[in-house]
Image (tube, rainbow, N blue to C red):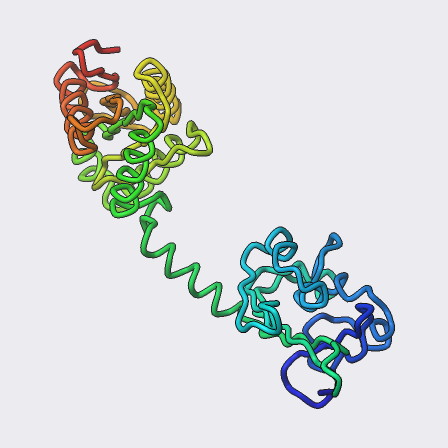
Amino acid sequence: MASLSVPVFVLDTRARVMIWNRACEELTGVPAGEMVGTSEHWRSFYEQERPTLADLVLRRRLDDGREAVPQIYPRTEGAAGAPAVLSLESWCDMPRAGRRRYLAADASPIYDAGGRLSAVVETLRDLTDEKMAQVALEQLATRDGLTGLANRRCFDDTLHAEWARALRQQQPLSLLMVDVDNFKAYNDAHGHLGGDECLKRVAKAVASEMRANDLVARYGGEEFAVILPNQSLKGAAIVAERIRARVEQLQLPCRFGGGKHVTVSIGAATAIAGPDNTASQLVAIADAALYRAKHLGRNRISLPMGDAA
């Protein structure tokens, strides 16, 4: 085991380290001399005390493992249905190595000739690069490349998920449609780079007004959409006004449409999800309110009943 290129450590039945191979030293930054004979192996992986996968095999209690590390799953079963091999993938703190790593672990019991448990071996694989690549791909699939906001695909998926939840919980779901006023003229005057910078500044302003469970997305072109779960129309109007004011306060120079600075128009809509209405209807109502805000002179919010601010 000492010569294996795969990081490996072995615990005896009292959870003391018997073997801590060279590859494990390189991964954790902790020499074998500090680990062998101790039960302090967890310190190599976590800031706060918690069992490693090998500890959980020793305990033979998968329920404890699920509390400690939710992603544990049994690979095979031993006698009386006890987990013989456990596997998990998770982020580890790696305090001595000075870097968080995403590790895949497998832990297996070792039995003596009489069938009694004598030790547990845990093998580790560093999947950090693969995990980071996966995260990057997921971001490409759900994020707008220019603004960093959620993209249209993510908006559509989130809206339908929030609609389903609102239906189950009988809670209101609000939606804001936000459009940059006179953006075509702005883009023509300042060029695409200037237009892109404008959109990024507006996107940041809109996102700054969001709660943790809200979603702001780039809906298309110069239009943004904001999903506000469990938010009344009155609450949505307050959020919309804060967004409108925040964008105006950016004071991005604009000489078009009679104003001095870049502004936005916002349409708001709220619905109680039910069998007689749909998420698409909520979008249509918010769109109609946005059109009304534009028609009434821009740089304002409009509500479904026609009231404008």
Residue visible at 64% across and 73% down in the picture: 107
How many numbered tags mark residues here? 0
- Nearest the viewer among 88 and 150 is 88
Query: In the rendering, at what x and y percent does residue 52 appear?
Result: 69, 63
Query: In the rendering, at what x and y percent does residue 115 appear?
Result: 72, 81
Q: Quadrant of residue 119?
A: bottom right
Residue visible at 37% across and 46% down in the picture: 148
Residue 3's place in the image compared with 192, above or below, is: below
230 horizontally vs 266: left or right: right
Query: In the rendering, at what x and y percent does residue 121 appear?
Result: 69, 77
- Nearest the viewer among 21 and 266 is 21
273 horizontally vs 169: left or right: left
Residue visible at 72% across and 67% down in the picture: 58
199 horizontally vs 14: left or right: left
Residue 53's place in the image compared with 275, above or below, is: below
Give the quadrant of the C terminus.
top left
Query: In the rendering, at what x and y percent does residue 144 appear?
Result: 31, 48
